[in-house]
Image: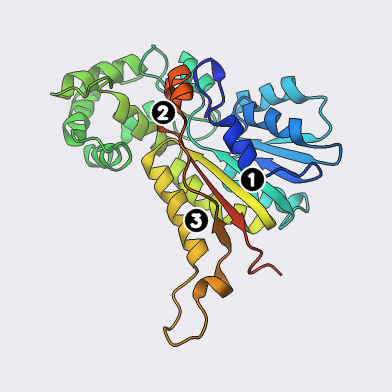
């Protein structure tokens, strides 16, 4: 999401991709600390509207402080997997002109030790985007069996030493609970026999556990079809991903909705002509060298854009 110093990644590119109409209706599905939201509001006229979602109570509080007097703006504390119901409640179904998703963890979440996302500073091993709901990372590690831990590290972290790390976690917790970020980071460092250049050995483990605890990939899979259903014809879907597994879900969803279902070969029309609900706009964008130098956290970002065709709308 946001970069060092809370610099918003690909801000200008993402807002340009929304193709903003001054009187349009827009959704920032991942408010974070509001970098994209403020840029969207700067292009909206008096009749424009922006709704934001975030499941992090600190993000919602920040929105109130920054934009509490902004009549064109509202925020709801919900995960973006509830975007469909949220827009239905407002009567905005199939009326939205653009929806932006900035996936992953935000810089404030990473930088605050008490949230437990970072292996670089000591804090409670939490990692929940909503610290008031669900199971913390420490609680999950305390109860999961070795095979489950290994599967999560392998599938979500693409960690080659997943089994070795899982075994070390189970052995360590038998002696004492694993309750802090530095405990887990040190344990992983001891278990991993080789080092990747310029990458902490705990990087993949923390990433995998965070994705698992927050069900982040499931959230993306659930939200994208709802977002498409909410878009008006010509409305834009703009997604920034930071993880290859997230980006794969986004890319496959956009391609699938652009292609349409398989039809019998003897039909005189192509599937896309009657079923394509999205049109992919341009190629995937990545941050330029200047942005990645200013903000190293931006280096893995990928931005994808698609436009609703209106096919299938009542």
Label for residue 254?
3
Q: Residue furthest right?
A: 46
Is residue 116 visible in the rendered image? The answer is: no
**Left or right, residue 67 beside residue 186:** right
Disc 3 element = helix
Give the number of the mark in front: 1 or 2: 2
The 10 Å Cα crowd at callout 3, few under 14, some 14 to 19, many 20 or more, is many
What's the CA distance linking mark 2 and mark 3? 23 Å
Colouring style: rainbow
Q: Position of residue 63 (x, y in %)?
A: 70, 25
Q: Is tag 2's residue or tag 3's residue first in the polypeptide sequence?
A: 3
Disc 1 element = strand
Q: Position of residue 291 (x, y in %)?
A: 48, 23
Disc 2 element = helix
Q: Is tag 3's residue or tag 1's residue first in the polypeptide sequence?
A: 1
Q: Is tag 1's residue or tag 2's residue first in the polypeptide sequence?
A: 1
In which quadrant of the rendered image does the C terminus lie? bottom right
**Left or right, residue 255 beside residue 230:** left
What's the CA distance linking mark 1 and mark 2? 23 Å
Q: Position of residue 6 (x, y in %)?
A: 55, 19
Name the foreground residue: 195 vs 218: 195
Q: Residue at x 48, y 86 (%)?
A: 267
Image vertical order of residue 232 relative to residue 133, above or below: below
Label for residue 99?
1
**Left or right, residue 214 beside residue 33:** left
Is residue 220 visible in the rendered image? The answer is: yes
Q: Residue at x 22, y 37 (%)?
A: 146
Residue receiving disc 2: 299
What's the CA distance linking mark 3 and mark 1? 14 Å
Name the foreground residue: 198 vs 52: 198
Image vertical order of residue 188 relative to residue 284, above or below: above
Name the foreground residue: 91 vs 276: 276
């Amino acid at each position: 999401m946001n970069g060092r110093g809370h610099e918003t990644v690909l801000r200008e590119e993402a807002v340009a991709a929304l193709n903003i109409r001054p009187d349009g209706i827009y959704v920032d599905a991942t408010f974070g600390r509001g970098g994209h939201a403020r840029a969207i509001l700067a292009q909206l006229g008096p009749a424009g509207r922006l709704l934001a979602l975030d499941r992090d109570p600190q993000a919602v509080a920040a929105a109130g402080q920054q934009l509490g007097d902004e009549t064109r703006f509202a925020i709801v504390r919900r995960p973006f997997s509830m975007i469909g119901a949220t827009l239905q409640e407002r009567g905005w179904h199939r009326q939205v002109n653009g929806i932006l998703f900035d996936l992953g963890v935000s810089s404030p979440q990473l930088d605050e030790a008490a949230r437990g996302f970072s292996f670089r500073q000591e804090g409670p091993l939490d990692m929940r985007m909503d610290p008031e709901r669900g199971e913390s990372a420490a609680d999950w590690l305390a109860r999961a069996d070795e095979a489950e831990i290994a599967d999560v590290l392998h599938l979500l972290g693409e960690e080659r030493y997943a089994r070795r790390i899982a075994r070390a976690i189970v052995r360590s917790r038998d002696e004492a609970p694993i309750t802090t970020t530095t405990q887990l980071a040190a344990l992983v460092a001891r278990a991993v026999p080789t080092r990747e250049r310029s990458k902490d050995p705990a990087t993949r483990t923390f990433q995998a556990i965070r994705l698992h605890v927050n069900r982040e990939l499931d959230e993306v899979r659930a939200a994208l079809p709802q977002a498409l259903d909410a878009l008006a014809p010509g409305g834009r879907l703009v997604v920034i991903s930071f993880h290859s597994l997230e980006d794969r879900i986004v890319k496959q969803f956009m391609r699938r909705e652009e292609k349409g279902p398989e039809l019998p070969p003897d039909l005189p029309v192509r599937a896309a002509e009657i079923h394509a609900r999205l049109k992919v706009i341009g190629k995937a964008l990545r941050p330029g060298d200047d942005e990645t130098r200013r903000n190293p956290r931006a280096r893995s970002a990928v931005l994808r854009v698609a436009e609703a065709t209106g096919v299938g709308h009542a």
